[in-house]
């Protein structure tokens, strides 16, 4: 009974983690998009929050914010007092929007930021479904005849070893990742992630740069001081190694260097981004030029995702072919062995 209770708790935690992984960016994107639309339509913040609380997608967010909003607190203050649900980027952007009076426009930029993150996640996960189904089918289907010719135990004996190997490797990777996610290990984790094979490392780096750019655009458009915007956007990149380098550049900005000069020696920001920083400084339209840079990088991400999703099925096909060949070889080896024993 005690073990069953602990098992149920662990299962529930895993389910919650999976749901949170899949829906977190989607919920935020929907929340900010709806808030922007309602504020532009002239609906007050408190009424907008009440309406969003009644919707399933944003019910949790609405429940956390509404008590503070009903007490007359501004939206940024309500977000700050809602635990760890909102990042510094979101709170600072909303706060600046409330002061400047362009809250609806900044809510829309935050929506675009989270939509980009969700889009990459959706494409990768959905692209993995077919290879995963193929791999499972390749293990199960050849073993089905054992159910009729031998027994259920023979069937399980055939399929369990490869499944144990696959899922064991998956849980091993997950365990290592969670271990390296401790604060003191995050930089090591992010260094390893950037060196990941099959194009994953490049994809992670490009996504981190896009996150930095879009976060900076939100903050810069809100009127947040440039130095503070660089620091907050650096943390929003999601990679400690890239954040560390961006913060070094932020110190140069603090000393009076223009952004293009401060970032010119970056190992992570591509030349396109540096050029766009320079163009923005010269034209005075920094947010517009950086949005173009983010758009180009997003196209690079889409191409990288497509390339990865072409490589992975090929790898799965090779694994499946090797597995089937092993079964066939094993069958004929036993067959000829039986013939030889009869002849002897």
Image (cartoon, helix red, strand yellow):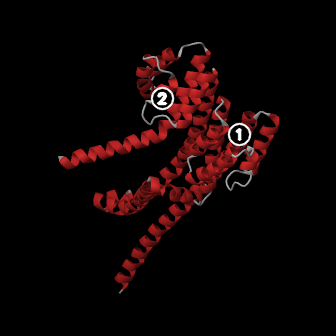
At x 53%, y 52%, the residue is 131
Query: Can you tell which of label 1 and label 2 is closer to the viewer?
Result: 2
Name the quarter where the C terminus is drawn. Answer: bottom left
Q: Is residue 253 visible?
A: yes
Label 2: how many Cα within 10 Å (few below 14, some 14–19, many 20+)? many
Q: Secondary structure at mark 1?
A: helix
What is the x, y in percent for residue 167? 41, 57
131 sits to left or right of 109: left
Above/below status of 292 relative to 94: below
Q: Position of residue 281 (x, y in %)?
A: 78, 39
> Could you tell me which secondary element the residue under label 2 belongs to?
helix
Residue highlighted by disc 2: 79
Above or below, comparing residue 119 to residue 203 in the picture: above
Q: Which residue is mark 1?
A: 295
- Pick the residue in front: 31 or 152: 31
Image side of residue 43 versus residue 264, left or right: left
Of the numbered discs 1 and 2, the one sitting upstream in the chain is 2
Q: Residue lying farthest right?
A: 282
Can the viewer see residue 181 in this picture?
Answer: no
Residue at 72%, 51% in the rendered image: 270
């Amino acid at each position: 009974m005690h073990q069953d209770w602990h098992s149920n708790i662990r299962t529930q935690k895993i389910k919650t983690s999976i749901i949170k992984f899949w829906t977190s960016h989607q919920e935020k994107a929907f929340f900010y998009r709806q808030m922007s639309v309602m504020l532009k339509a002239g609906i007050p913040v408190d009424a907008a929050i009440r309406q969003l609380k009644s919707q399933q997608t944003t019910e949790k967010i609405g429940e956390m914010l509404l008590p503070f909003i009903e007490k007359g607190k501004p939206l940024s203050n309500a977000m700050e007092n809602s635990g760890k649900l909102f990042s510094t980027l979101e709170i600072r952007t909303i706060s600046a929007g409330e002061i400047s009076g362009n809250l609806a426009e900044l809510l829309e930029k935050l929506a675009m930021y989270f939509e980009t993150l969700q889009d990459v996640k959706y494409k990768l996960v959905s692209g993995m479904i077919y290879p995963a189904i193929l791999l499972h089918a390749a293990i199960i289907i050849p073993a089905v005849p054992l159910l009729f010719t031998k027994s259920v135990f023979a069937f399980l004996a055939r399929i369990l070893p490869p499944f144990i190997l696959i899922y064991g490797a998956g849980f091993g990777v997950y365990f290592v990742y969670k271990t390296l996610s401790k604060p003191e290990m995050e930089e090591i984790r992010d260094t390893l992630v950037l060196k990941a094979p099959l194009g994953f490392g490049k994809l992670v780096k490009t996504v981190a740069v896009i996150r930095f750019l879009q976060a900076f655009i939100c903050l810069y458009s809100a009127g947040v001081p440039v130095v503070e915007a660089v620091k907050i956007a650096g943390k929003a990149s999601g990679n400690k190694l890239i954040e560390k380098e961006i913060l070094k550049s932020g110190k140069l900005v603090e000393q009076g260097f223009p952004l293009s000069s401060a970032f010119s020696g970056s190992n992570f920001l591509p030349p396109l981004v540096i050029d766009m920083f320079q163009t923005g400084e010269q034209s005075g339209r920094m947010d517009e030029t950086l949005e173009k840079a983010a758009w180009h990088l997003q196209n690079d991400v889409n191409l990288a995702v497509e390339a990865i999703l072409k490589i992975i099925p090929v790898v799965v096909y090779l694994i499946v072919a090797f597995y089937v060949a092993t079964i066939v070889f094993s069958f004929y080896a036993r067959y000829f062995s039986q013939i030889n024993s009869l002849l002897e």
